[in-house]
Structures are given as structure tokens and as C-alpha cells.
Amino acid sequence: MPSLRVLVTGGAGFLGSHLCDRLVASGVDVICLDNFFTGSKDNVAHLLGNPRFELLRHDIVHPILLEVDQIYNLACPASPIHYQYNPVKTIKTSVMGAINMLGLAKRVRARILQASTSEVYGDPKVHPQTEAYWGHVNPIGIRSCYDEGKRVAETLMMDYHRQNNVDIRIVRIFNTYGPRMAVNDGRVVSNFIVQALRNQPITIYGDGSQTRSFCFVSDLIDGLWRLMNTEGLTGPVNIGNPREFTIRELAGLVISLTGSKSEIVQKPLPQDDPIQRQPDISLATGKLGWQPSVALKDGLVSTIEYFQRRLAV
Ligand code: NAD
Ligand code: UDP
């Protein structure tokens, strides 16, 4: 039997490259598609000689025809500084990218998994967030290009499913961190680690009492893989680590694990920054048998080791 052919858009990014590793290791053929906006060839350089792996430079706002059995649609900048750099391009990537990938899935009868986000819950008034919550999103703010783009991508997924019977999966990913985040990624975990390793001030936005729940990348990838390969789950599924921390707690943990001399400084809180965030993962636990296994401290240790190597060269 020919092996499964799997397309990973955004495959040279942080999450996409770990997913490519996992897929190649499982023996399937992988096409990694990326426009290298925030991703890098370095993230997949170790896979380039592998006959199961192909790297394709392409932008998903343009259609493409590929013979594949499964599509993981991950292409989209995920860090606020990057998705706000060119907001029109960000929303085009989510909306036109989803249309193009769903069109492809429909034509070649592939199963498609859309990377959605906890940002569809906005600044949530329900805590922790269950998949049934419709969210509290500002449609006209500086985060909207990302949040609303992902909400439309979810809508498109459900409509292609209802109208054209496309086989879909939607994952709402909560804050995930780990090796291969870019040094200039701008999200909180990589910022704090890079600042701590350079003994530069740790920048807390606002008073640091806002919360996030941090999932280590290996747990997240396991969740994506299980969702893609489980039957009968078309609606959105939260994947994240329910253990919630304040941003100030995270800063303290990073300083103690790195032994850094950095001081903490406060910067203004960006507009519409969510106050709290924690996934309810009952659905993933019940239907996928999934739960995270890596504690924040252990995940941070391996992420710190990665950045130590990156900053040393
Ligand atoms: P990332 O920025 O490292 O990866 C995104 C990848 O998509 C990059 O390789 C980038 O070059 C590529 N890309 C961007 N626009 C593209 C386009 N128009 N055409 C082709 N490729 C394009 O971010 P990540 O953390 O790996 O996120 C991956 C996916 O997961 C994104 O869809 C993101 O919205 C989603 N997500 C991530 C998190 C997280 O905490 N990491 C949380 C929620 C959702
Ligand atoms: N944050 C911070 N300092 C930084 C980067 C981010 O205090 O250097 C805060 C940010 O304001 C937010 C939280 O950390 O409250 C998580 O930010 P991130 O950009 O990682 O993800 P998101 O806000 O999209 O969840």
C-alpha cells in the first residue's frame, strides 16, 4: 500500500517543524509548505535529505494543487508582533489560506485539520474556556486581524463540512512554547528566556497579574496527531495545558531556572490583551485520551537549553 501523503502548511515554523518531525518518524510522506515569513529552513534542515520529506516555498493566499491525503493547515504568524506587522496579510492568510486549503481538501478528498487558537475566546468572560463558549472578541482592535481571521477560518471549515462534506478537524491551540521558537519571536516565553540569558531587563507588560496556561510543544503535537487520526470529531477541540500561571510567576520561574541577574521592568499592557486564559480540556481527555504530561518547569529547562545553544553561536 502506498504511504500516506501529508501536507503541513507553515511547516517550517515552530509548531509545524515539530509536526513534520513527528510525521516523518511515523513513516508517512510529508510535504512541508511555507513562505518563510516567521519560519525558517533551519527548523527543518535536518529533514532535507530524508526521501520522505519535501520542502516547498509557497504562500497559501494563492491556490495550489497537490495530491495529498491529509492537510494540517498551520500557516499563519502566531506572535502578536509578527501578526500585527502586516495585519491585512495576516487576515488574508487565515481567510484565503483556509479557502485555498479547503478547496484542495475538497478536490483531492483529503482530511484537513485547521490550527485555530484560544484567541477565538478573546478576553474571555467564561473561565476556564470550554469549546461551547462563543468568546468575547473585539472585531476592530489590533488583535482582530488574527482573532477574527481564525474565527472565519473555523466558520469556513464548518461550512465546507456541512455543504461539501469535507472531512475536517479544528484544534484550538492554547499558548505553546518550546525549542525552535525564533529568538525574535516576541511571545512571552521566548522573550523572557532570551532576556534572562542576556542579563537584560525582563519586560512584563502591565502589572503581570494576567494569566496564561503554557503547553510544551511535544504535548501539543501529540494532541494534533491524535485529533487528526480520531474519527468523528468535527467540532473544535481545545488543546493546551490547564495549569494557569500569572506572567509575573513565569518571569520569576525563568529568572530562577537561568540564574539570571536580570531585573524586572514594567511596560504598558498592549490593547485588548486578555486578562486570563485557561483551557477546559475535558473534550480532548474524553475523546482523544489526551492530556499534557510536561510540567512548565521541565519544559522551560529544555527550552532554556535550546536558547543557550542558539545564543552561543
Ligand atoms: P510560527 O510563526 O512559528 O509559524 C507559522 C508558520 O507559517 C511560519 O513558518 C510562517 O513562515 C508560515 N506562514 C505564515 N504565513 C504564511 C503564508 N501566507 N503562506 C505560507 N506560510 C506562511 O507560529 P507557530 O507558533 O508555529 O504557530 C503555528 C500555527 O499554530 C499558527 O496557525 C498559529 O496561529 C497556531 N497557534 C499557535 C499557538 C502557539 O502558542 N504556538 C497558539 C495558538 C495557535
Ligand atoms: N508579555 C509580557 N512580556 C513580553 C511579551 C508578552 O508581559 O515580553 C505578556 C503579554 O502582554 C500577554 C502574555 O505575556 O499578557 C502572553 O503574551 P504572548 O504574546 O506570548 O501571547 P498571547 O497574548 O497571544 O497569549
Image (cartoon, grey):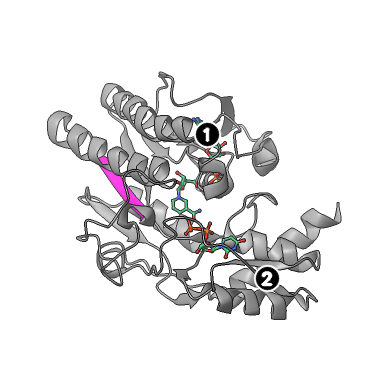
What residue is drawn where x is 22% and y is 50%?
235
- Badge 2 is on which residue? 265
Whether residue 305 can be seen here: no
Q: In front: mark 2 or mark 1?
A: 2
- Tell me where the magenta segment starts and ends, as one range: 167-172
Observer-nearest of 274 and 20: 274
- Badge 1 is on which residue? 86
Q: Position of residue 288 (x, y in %)?
A: 30, 62
Q: Amino acid at mark 1?
A: Asn
Alpha carbon of mark 2 to alpha carbon of mark 1: how far?
28 Å
Q: Is residue 123 left or right of residue 175?
A: left
Rendered view: 191 above or below 258: above
Q: Amino acid at mark 2?
A: Val
What residue is drawn where x is 67% and y is 34%?
48
Rendered view: 100 above or below 299: above
Rendered view: 230 above or below 140: below
Observer-nearest of 106 and 196: 196
What is the total number of numbered labels drawn onto the structure image? 2
Q: Position of residue 93 (x, y in %)?
A: 43, 32
Tell me whether the residue at label 2 lies in contact with that at label 1, contact meaning CB atoms closer than 8 angstroms.
no
